[in-house]
Image (cartoon, rainbow, N blue to C red):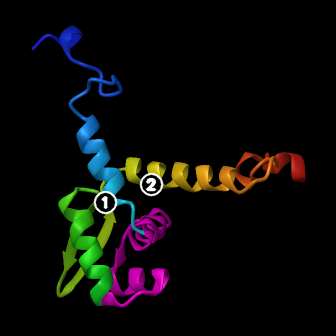
C-alpha cells in the first residue's frame, strides 16, 4: 500500500464524508449530546450515573447508549452485573465541544463567547 496515494480523510472526495454525516445524524439528539458531555467528565460511568447526569430514565439512556456503542462512539466494561461506559476516543468529545462552542457563537450577539475568554486575564 502506497501511503502517498491514500486519500486524505479531510478531502471533499473522501470516502469518510458519508460516514461523517451518519455521525452528525447520530449526535443530532440532545440526550446523546448530554451523554457525551457526561462521559467526557469521567473515565467511565454506569447507566444509572449517566441517567442521573442527563435527567433521563436508565431505560431511555440504555437505548441511546446502544446506538452510540454500535457507532463505536462509546465502549463498555463489565464488572459483575454492572456495565460501565466510556468514550471510545477523544473525537466525539471534541465534536460535541465544538458544536457547543458554535452554539455559543450563534447567541453571542457580537460579543466574545465565554469559551474565548482567557482565564488568566480575569485573575
Mark 1 surroundings within 10 Å by alpha-carbon count, few (fewer than 14), some (14 through 19), many (20 or more) = some
Quarter of the image for residue 33 reads: bottom left
Quarter of the image for residue 65 reads: bottom left
Residue ID for mark 1: 26
Residue ID for mark 2: 93
Mark 2 surroundings within 10 Å by alpha-carbon count, few (fewer than 14), some (14 through 19), many (20 or more) = many
Q: Quadrant of the N terminus?
A: top left
Q: Nearer the viewer, mark 1 or mark 2?
A: 1
Q: Nearer the viewer, residue 29 or 77?
A: 29
- The location of residue 48, given as percent across then percent down, is 36, 87
Residue 54 numbered tag: none
Whether 88 is among the magenta residues is no
Q: Nearer the viewer, residue 45 or 11?
A: 11
Q: Which residues are magenta?
A: 30-58
Secondary structure that dominates the magenta span: helix
Instruction: Report the side of 115 relative to 87 (left or right).
Output: right
CA gap, disc 1 to disc 2? 14 Å
Amino acid at each position: 500500500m502506497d501511503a502517498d496515494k491514500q486519500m486524505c480523510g479531510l478531502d471533499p472526495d473522501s470516502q469518510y464524508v458519508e460516514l461523517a454525516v451518519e455521525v452528525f445524524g447520530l449526535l443530532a439528539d440532545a440526550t446523546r449530546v448530554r451523554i457525551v458531555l457526561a462521559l467526557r467528565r469521567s473515565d467511565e460511568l454506569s447507566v444509572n450515573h449517566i441517567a442521573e447526569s442527563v435527567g433521563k430514565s436508565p431505560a431511555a439512556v440504555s437505548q441511546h447508549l446502544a446506538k452510540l456503542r454500535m457507532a463505536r462512539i462509546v465502549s463498555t466494561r463489565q464488572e459483575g452485573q454492572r456495565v460501565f461506559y466510556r468514550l471510545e476516543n477523544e473525537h466525539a468529545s471534541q465534536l460535541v465541544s465544538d458544536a457547543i462552542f458554535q452554539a455559543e457563537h450563534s447567541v453571542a450577539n457580537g460579543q466574545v463567547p465565554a469559551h474565548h475568554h482567557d482565564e488568566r486575564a480575569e485573575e
